[in-house]
Image: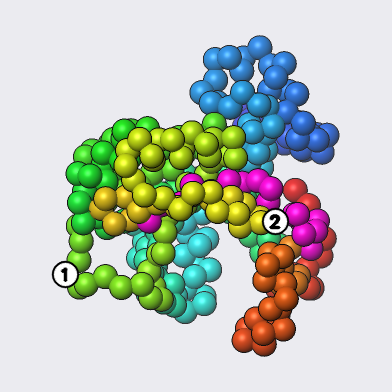
Amino acid sequence: MDDRPVIGQRLKEFQQREIDRILGACTACGKCFEVCPMAQYSKAPATDGKQVVPGVLAVLQGGQGSPEALGFWSDRLEAEGVAVERGESSLLFADPEGLQHELVVDESGDSPLVAVHPEIPAELALHGFEGVRAYSYRPQSTAAVLERLMNAESHDGDRWELRGDARRGWITLDPIPDEPARQSAGTIHHIAWNTTEAEHGRWLEVLQEAGIPNSGIVDRHYFRSIYFREPGGILFELATAEPGFTVDGPVEELGTRIILPPWLEQQRPAIESRLTPLPDPRADWAPVTR
């Protein structure tokens, strides 16, 4: 009698019990990574254990990118009347304004940015932005800015990768279409790159030395930004994650009311009168935690 199937099933059950135990006990403090003797051999770029925890939890929850996730999203989009084009490892579709989007299988190994939604299983959730495609009037000059100023690494001549402590992203330069460009619905106004307030001073020095005009540090209340248009015409933003949108209240309240920076608060009645009221999609959700 072959006992291997029974042993295999018992092993899976044991693994699942251990996973459930770890998930139930985890406080996301990052101490496990800091004391793990094998961490030094991992490819994790972060030195802060807290930056590694989301990725570890996603793996335990089955949140690795997979072709099965593409099937889920294809069915979900088609159920809403959105036309999709399925590839072997990608899914193409357009939003109502005609902007093209592509979902790809995540093979980066980065810590995912997974949102909680009662209709989306954790193992099929989106992990964040993979990259962005842009048009440049002067591709060689744009490439120089990416490589020399922003420390991007060139791949295949038309794609550049930028990496931070916890995540990476890429930008691809596509051939410019024949139609003249104009800012309107269905276009992207600018591309934002994540940075910190501590790094803003260095970025201003780098831009000054390169002779690239910039906005200086712009206080958006929820974050700080530096804007500059590189020689190919693409508007870049160097935005901080801090202080964040919780300066106006706890994260649980985000999306339940309109929040405005202080300098627009006196215009609230006029602003709200021109907005279309939207129902709260979370109003009837049961409490969800992960």
Question: What number is the disc on residue 59?
Answer: none
* Residue 261 % position (x, y): 68, 64
Is residue 223 placed above or below 100 in the rendered structure? above
Mark linked to residue 178: 1
Q: What colour scheme was applied to this rendering of the protein? A: rainbow
Is residue 289 left or right of 230 when viewed as pictured?
A: right
Residue farthest to the bottom? Answer: 273
Q: Visible in this render: residue 6?
A: no
Residue 269 screen position, x and y as percent = 72, 83
Q: Between label 1 and label 2, give the one nearer the viewer.
A: 2
Relative image position of residue 185 (x, y in whole percent): 41, 76
Q: Residues within 10 Å of mark 1 (few under 14, many from 20)?
A: few
Q: Residue at x 46, y 40 (%)?
A: 204
Question: Between residues 107 and 226, which one lies in front from this camera angle?
Answer: 226
Residue 236 part of the magenta segment: yes
Report the Cα–Cα distance between label 1 and label 2: 40 Å
**Magenta stretch bounds:** 235-253
Which residue occupies 66% across, 55% down? 222
Label 2: element kind = helix
> Mark 1 or mark 2: which comes first in sequence?
1
Q: Which three-letter amino acid code belongs to the residue tagged 2?
A: Phe
Residue matched to label 2:
245
**Viewer-nearest residue: 244 or 212:** 212
Secondary structure beneath dot 1 equals loop
Identified by mark 1, the residue type is Asp
Q: Is residue 80 located in the magenta-colored stretch of the structure?
A: no
